[in-house]
């Protein structure tokens, strides 16, 4: 079935909305500050609606322009500006939370911590411990060779071709000495392992105290959205604005505007995130007045 002009216009509107949302996300990444990003987002949202309306036919554009001069139209345009401003501020705060969390991670987790977490070595070995470990490894191989020599010599003794008694005594004594070296090295390595585990647990406990979880164990985890989910109506407002060219809403049909309410602190909020939530929670929301 051929696409009508109206359907084509609606498709163009939807495509322009999707492109603009992508541009808004790109702007969030490159913004130098939350305030600057909020202004950019507000501008992009205004562009989005302008592009949508440009896709209308000349007759529809004229009808829309005439309607915006009416009492209902002026009320809608004012509502739209205020809704866009609220949405921009909410998104800017989301960026602030992400930046605050990243700053806390950078402050409390060093590159050395990340390397230790990856390798499992939280404690450096002393020179004595490294030497003991090498001697323990070498001693293990020597002990195997001595034991093998003794076994071979025992087998040969069955055929009266064994080594002299003195040599057997020396080999046994050497084996005992090597065994003592291995035991000493194993004890040294066991002590280091216990201290390394204690250091790992202490570091993990400090991170848990700061973040409520260990970011090294859950690198993808980030704080929840800063607002109470029930108080966020941005998606509905955006959908309402995108349908305005079709519905021509009256003043009574305009959704009531309100700022999202900051949520309570929860596990996973870092110190800077907690400070932001406390600051926003203590700030009186911007009053939203109905049109008369």
Image (cartoon, rainbow, N blue to C red):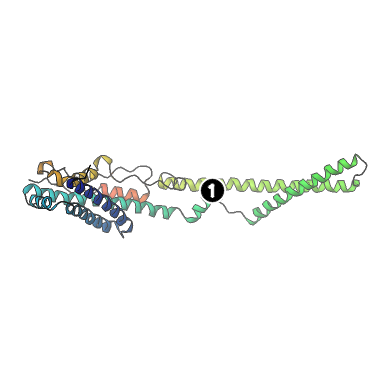
Q: Is residue 199 left or right of residue 270?
A: right
Farthest residue in the bottom direction? 32
Farthest residue in the front direction? 1
Placement of the C terminus among the 4 image quadrants: top left
Q: Position of residue 15 (x, y in %)?
A: 25, 50
Q: Residues within 10 Å of mark 1 (few under 14, many from 20)?
A: some
Q: Position of residue 119 (x, y in %)?
A: 55, 50
Q: How many marks?
A: 1
SS type, badge 1: helix
Placement of the N terminus among the 4 image quadrants: top left
Q: From the viewer's side, name the closer residue of 179 and 75.
A: 75
Above or below, 198 relative to 127: above
Disc 1 target residue: 199
Residue at the spot x=13%, y=51% of the render?
77
Q: Position of residue 54 (x, y in %)?
A: 17, 54
Q: Is residue 170 left or right of residue 105?
A: right
Farthest residue in the right direction? 160
Q: Is residue 11 left or right of residue 172?
A: left
Q: From the viewer's side, name the closer residue of 17 and 142.
A: 17
The answer to whether residue 285 is visible is no
The answer to whether residue 62 is visible is yes
Residue at the spot x=76%, y=49% of the render?
142
Q: Is residue 84 left or right of residue 167?
A: left
Quarter of image, res 253: top left
Q: Position of residue 7 (x, y in %)?
A: 20, 45
Above or below, 37 relative to 174: below
């Amino acid at each position: 079935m051929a696409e009508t002009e109206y359907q084509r216009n609606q498709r163009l509107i939807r495509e322009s909305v999707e492109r603009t949302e992508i541009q808004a996300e790109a702007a969030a990444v490159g913004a130098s500050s939350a305030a600057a990003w909020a202004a950019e987002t507000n501008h992009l949202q205004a562009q989005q609606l302008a592009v949508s309306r440009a896709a209308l036919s000349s007759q529809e554009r004229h009808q829309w322009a005439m309607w915006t001069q009416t009492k209902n139209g002026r009320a809608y345009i004012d509502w739209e500006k205020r809704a866009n401003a609220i949405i921009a501020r909410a998104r800017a705060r989301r960026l602030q939370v992400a930046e605050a969390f990243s700053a806390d991670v950078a402050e409390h987790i060093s590159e050395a911590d990340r390397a230790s977490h990856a390798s499992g070595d939280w404690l450096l070995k002393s020179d004595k411990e490294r030497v003991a470990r090498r001697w323990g490894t070498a001693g293990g191989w020597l002990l195997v060779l001595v034991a093998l020599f003794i076994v071979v010599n025992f087998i040969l003794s069955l055929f009266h071709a064994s080594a002299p008694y003195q040599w057997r005594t020396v080999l046994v004594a050497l084996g005992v000495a090597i065994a003592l070296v291995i035991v000493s090295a194993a004890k040294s390595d066991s002590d280091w392992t216990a201290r390394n585990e204690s250091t790992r647990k202490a570091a993990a406990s400090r991170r848990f105290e700061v973040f409520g979880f260990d970011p090294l164990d859950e690198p993808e985890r980030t704080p929840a959205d800063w607002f109470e989910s029930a108080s966020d109506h941005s998606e509905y407002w955006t959908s309402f604005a995108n349908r305005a060219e079709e519905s021509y809403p009256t003043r009574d049909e305009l959704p009531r505007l309100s700022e999202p309410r900051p949520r309570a602190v929860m596990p996973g909020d870092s110190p800077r995130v907690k400070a932001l939530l406390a600051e926003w929670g203590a700030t009186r929301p911007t009053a939203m007045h109905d049109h008369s």
